[in-house]
Image: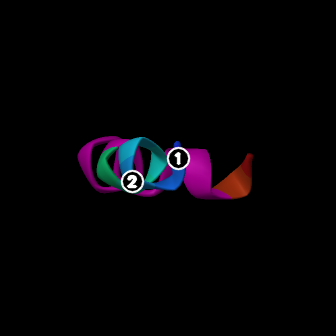
Amino acid sequence: EGELQVHKSQQEFGGKTSMK
């Protein structure tokens, strides 16, 4: 249960976490 938080971070950071 952490994908939702990651998804929100991706949109806020502009998809920077998408590379992680």
Is 8 in front, or is 18? 8
| Place of residue 2 in the rendered image (x, y in percent of width and height, measured from the top left) | 52, 43
Q: Is residue 15 magenta?
A: yes
The region drawn magenta spans: 9-18
Q: Residue at x 41, y 52 (%)?
A: 10
Question: Residue 15, image x and y in percent?
Answer: 45, 57
Nearer the observer, disc 1 or disc 2? 1
Q: Secondary structure at mark 2?
A: helix
How dense is the environment of label 1, judged by Cα within 10 Å: few (below 14), some, or many (20 and up)? few
Left or right of 10? Residue 12 is left
Q: Is residue 20 left or right of residue 12?
A: right
Percent from the top left, x then y, of residue 1? 52, 46
Q: Under tag 1, what secondary structure?
A: loop
Q: Provide the residue designation for mark 1.
A: 1
Instruction: Give the amino acid at mark 2.
Output: Leu
Q: CA distance from mark 1 to mark 2?
A: 7 Å
Q: Residue at x 51, y 54 (%)?
A: 3
- Which residue position holds label 2? 4
Determine the main secondary structure of the stretch shown in magenta. Answer: helix
Q: Amino acid at mark 1?
A: Glu
